[in-house]
Image (cartoon, rainbow, N blue to C red):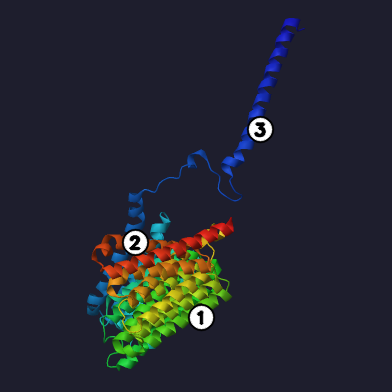
Amino acid sequence: MVDEGEGQELRDTVKRLEATVAALEARLAKLEAREPSRSVAEPGSPAVTPSAVAPEQRDLEAHVGTYWLSRLGIVALIVGIAYLITYHFGELGVLARVGAGYLLSAGLGAFGLWLARRHQLFGRIVFGGGLALAYFVTYALHFIPAVRVIDSEVLALVLLAGFVVAIVTIAHRMQSETVAGIALFLGLHTGMLSDITAFTLLSTTLLATGALFFLVRNRWVIVPLSSLVAVYSTHVVWAVRTGHMAPGAPESDRLFLSLAFLTLYFLLFSVALLVRPRDLPVRASLAFTLLNWVGLTSLGAYEVSQEQHSRLFSFLLVVAVAHGAGAAVSRLQRAPAALTHTYLALTAVTFALAMPAHYEDVALVAAWTVTGLVAGLAARGVESQVLGAVGVLILYVALGACEWETPGRLTLLTGLVVAFVLVERGGTVRVAGLPAPEARLPFTAICAVGAGLSLVALVGARMPEGLVTLGWVIAAFLLFGVGFAVRERWYRLAALAVLGLALGRLVLLDVAKLPADQRVLTFILLGVMLLVVSYTYTRLRDRRG
């Protein structure tokens, strides 16, 4: 039987245990309440553990050693073997040439698969090199003289097409962008190791088509983007090696063949991009669009200017219309607005580039002014800040060119003043995250500066040599009038800036150098204009009050 003292001790122990359990439960409740804010910021986001709070910095040395050296190594190896096949396989028999080439590629591919069991990424890089080497051997069977065993160009193209399909199928089943990238990239570049002909361009087109399969089906970006660069690079190499593409053919046929390939490249990449534009990252879409435009425009303009300069204007107009069609298709496909606006901006830029090929002197400045005005006004309809900026840039180009043109200069400057004001009035594009009045400030300021410079040049061209300062004052007065008329303070600020420059010139230069009559006229007109402007400000202030 337990005495009373032991019973009291047991009760005290139970109470202490109960208090401890209660404290633990309270602490556990606090931890559970605090855990979601620490580890689960958003549904579906990975938990943040104490060891992952600070992201681990990438080791540059390890990244270079594992990523770049492996890729550079396989490129150097495949290029070296390609040169070996090109220069020394001619000493072997027919079967030995074919067998040795495919044996080397099969051995390299098998070695890559074996390595992939332990180091998957590194092994796939080597395996992709084996596929690229096999493609080059197939390419060499017709094109490389030392290895040629196939005389039929049609049969050679069929074999190449089949091998490209095999590369695409293997990479797609492996779901390996590394294999696809290495194989197609090396395949595209090994064709540049010898003379480039129409057959070379056809083979690169086949490889580019294979790369675009991954863009459309898997939405991979790096592989087709590198193939775009490689395809146009191959054409660049051909462009500086004249006479190889169509030996003995007339220049017109050679130009037609070159433009046909450039058109094919442009259509392939544009169609692949616009099939499902919403599934691609916006930056990738813009990169494709810009690089495709650069390749087509620069190479095509070079070819046309070298052979038939008179058709350069027509070529650039066709390129501009093609990008306008791209903008329409992207809008129908409900692509991101940035892609549509980029197509529109490239349309305006290409139109501007076409003008010097057809117009000169006054007509050229007028053509640029019209192009910039149309682009700036169109930006309002499509709500494109990029297109509006391009329109203003073209107007500035016209203004700069106008300084060197004497005949019709006054009419051109007047048109530029009107164009800047109209574009600014139409520039209602909103910038995300800014209130409506603040969103247009940079655009309005740039247009106001352009209008101010145009007015200064316009009035200065009409004033005698000794009254340049007075011309600046008149230009400032007109700017004030525009600012009050359209109720835009940036024009008035530009007028104040011009007025400040005029006053500085008056005090520092004109007071000492001007004749007495011109000095009297300048100061009187300056005083009258300043009083008129000040009176206008006073009236406005009283009305607001």
- 238 left or right of 205 in image: left
The x, y position of residue 289, in whole percent, is 45, 72
Instruction: Kindly report which numbered mark, 2 or 1, lies closer to the viewer in this rendering.
Output: 2
- The residue beneath circle 1 is 325
- 44 left or right of 124 in image: right
Chain-order first, disc 2 or disc 3: 3
Position of residue 370 relative to residue 538, above or below, is below
Q: Secondary structure at mark 3?
A: helix
Q: In which quarter of the view is residue 195 placed?
A: bottom left
Q: Secondary structure at mark 1?
A: helix
- 233 left or right of 326 in image: left
- The residue beneath circle 3 is 29
- Residue 417 tag number: none
Does residue 264 show up? yes
Mark 2 to mark 1 CA distance (whole Å) = 52 Å
Instruction: Kindly report which numbered mark, 2 or 3, lies closer to the viewer in this rendering.
Output: 2
Q: Nearer the viewer, residue 205 or 112?
A: 205
Q: In which quarter of the view is residue 403 placed?
A: bottom left
**Residue at position x 30%, y 73% in the image:** 100
Mark 3 near mark 1, Cβ–Cβ under 8 Å? no
Mark 3 to mark 1 CA distance (whole Å) = 62 Å
Q: Secondary structure at mark 2?
A: helix
The amino acid sitting under disc 2 is Leu
Q: Which residue is at the far right?
A: 1
